[in-house]
Amino acid sequence: MHAAEFFSTYGNSSAAPWSGNSNYVANEAALFAALHDLYGDAHRPLRPMPSYKEELTSRLLSERVRTYLETGVNTGESLMLGRDLALAIGVDPAPKVPPGIFDKPPFRLVAKPSDDFFLETFSGDGPDFTLDLAFIDGLHVFEYALRDVIGCEALAAPGCEVLVHDVLPRRGAEAARHRFSRAWTGDVWRVPMVLRHFRPDLTVRLSESAPTGLAVISGLDSRNTVLMEQYDEVVAYGLGLSILDFMQDRDAHVAAV
Ligand SMILES: C[S@@+](CC[C@H](N)C(=O)[O-])C[C@H]1O[C@@H](n2cnc3c(N)ncnc32)[C@H](O)[C@@H]1O
């Protein structure tokens, strides 16, 4: 399957419970207590590690990285780290960036959902760039983050790394598919789990970077279409995983590579 066909079939295909920053509840403690049976309530902070921004910055400063894509720009804090690259693309349907700062090269700011960006990129003459690094931090819902990985892999230059933010929730309720809480990882934690299952050829490392973990994916191959071909099965497998089991085994998942 070609990437354009994949994104035209599956892009924006799952319900998007993204609720912006406005409707989380004020009393998180009461909320977490109420959600105990569904999600477990043990609060398990990560070990103190460098933050995700430090992990991102060290890569963006390396000689190897010249081109970068980020899904989920928000205020542009992390996209700005790419200012010395040859190309730094930011994709976000509702960026909250100060006017003017991402208008010039190396930046390309695309104010669209990432599925639309990928569909357009792979349509027509196809992409005019490859990626050395990508950071996925857009819609915190499993299928969306998974499709972001799929799109980035199809654009990957040899040696490309894809970083996925928010893969280690500190408590089950923080990982709900609908946003209840101020700090929200959503169920992006399913992404590294499905990659390890369906793509044993990839290296998927889980870093306990503050505040909510980072997956570092390497060994990507732009010609590999397994995730596109088996997308329905991959999604069904991922949605079948239990957050309670994941939280219980979180240390083992971090230790496994
Ligand atoms: C957590 S913020 C990103 C923070 C930023 N990467 C940083 O570290 O400073 C998540 C962003 O994802 C954006 N978003 C929501 N749905 C998206 C989608 N379908 N594609 C890309 N971005 C999306 C939101 O508008 C929001 O700005």
Image (spheres, helix red, strand yellow):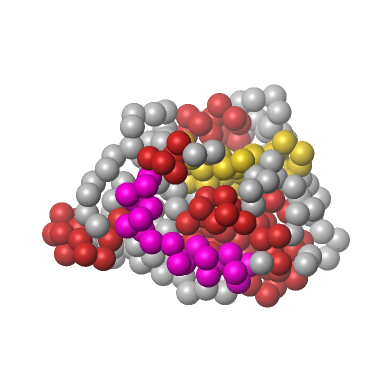
Picture coordinates of residue 248 (x, y %)? 32, 49
Direction right: furthest residue: 125
Picture coordinates of residue 180 (x, y %)? 28, 63
Picture coordinates of residue 152 (x, y %)? 67, 51
Nearer to the camera, 5 or 194: 194
Is 209 positioned to the left or the right of 196 in the image? left
Q: Main secondary structure of the magenta part?
A: helix
Is 146 positioned to the left or the right of 5 in the image? left
Q: Is residue 27 above or below residue 84?
A: below
Q: Is residue 232 above or below residue 45?
A: below
Range of residues picked out in magenta? 231-250
Picture coordinates of residue 17 (x, y %)? 41, 69
User: Is any part of residue 148 visible from this angle?
Assistant: no
Please identify the quarter of the rendering in which residue 116 is found: bottom right
> Residue, x 66% and y 60% (percent of image)?
227
Image label count: 0
